[in-house]
Amino acid sequence: MRIDLASFAFGFTLIDGTGTPPWGTALGQKSPLYKFNHEGFQEILVGMVYNIAPLKDVWLPLGKGGAVVTGLDNSGIQLASVFYSVHVNDNKIEHPFAMILFKEESESHRGRRHIKYTPKISFRDNRGYVYSNEGFLKKVYEQFDLASDACWFVSEINISNQSELHFRAHFVSKNGSKVYQNSKERKEAWMRLI
């Protein structure tokens, strides 16, 4: 499934505008019902159901204050999934990764659902070990020999065999960050890489 451009991206600055990734992709945009219509959503949801995790064992900071919630907090988390077979550009990463199906309750988009993949998601496995998506990203940086401020982004998240999570990553600059005038310039540069 193609994800929103710059929704899972690192190591860039915009001179004009904000460069904070939203860490998620909406599965439907048409109000008032926001029915699922994002191409590839079926594969993602089937994989998420297959890799379901107890809502009590997944934590996500929400909003600008970053209050940490679980799926039991009536927070909008509807489904949590943890994948233990995760790949970036067909390279296996030895660390699990969690994704969340999240339902918005804001007045402007009430009912819209997103797949969330923020680095700030933490989760506990059935043995009691606690992991985070930040730990996964640390492994990616090590495995691909990326500088801590490397510029890279993910354009697709796909599921294989219901249990394997695959990221399609593009490394803009492995040795450092990139500066763009605005989001239009960044989009044009990144679309040439996809």
Image: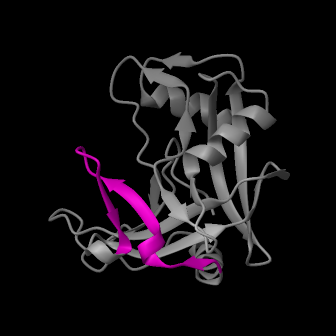
Left or right position of 89 against 40: right
| Quarter of the figure with the N terminus | bottom right
Asked if residue 181 is positioned above or below residue 116 in the image, the reply reads above
Is 62 colored magenta in this rendering? yes
| Quarter of the figure with the C terminus | top right
Kindly give the residue lying farthest to the right in the view shown.
Answer: 91
Name the residue rendered at 63%, 58% in the picture. 97
**Can residue 62 be seen at all in this image of the molecule?**
yes
x, y percentage for residue 110? Answer: 22, 71
Q: Nearer the viewer, residue 176 or 53?
A: 53
x, y percentage for residue 66? Answer: 28, 47
Is 185 colored magenta in this rendering? no
Kindly give the residue lying farthest to the front in the view shown.
Answer: 128
Name the residue rendered at 61%, 75% in the picture. 126
Q: Which region shows up in magenta? A: 51-71
Asked if residue 72 is positioned above or below residue 117 in the image, the reply reads below
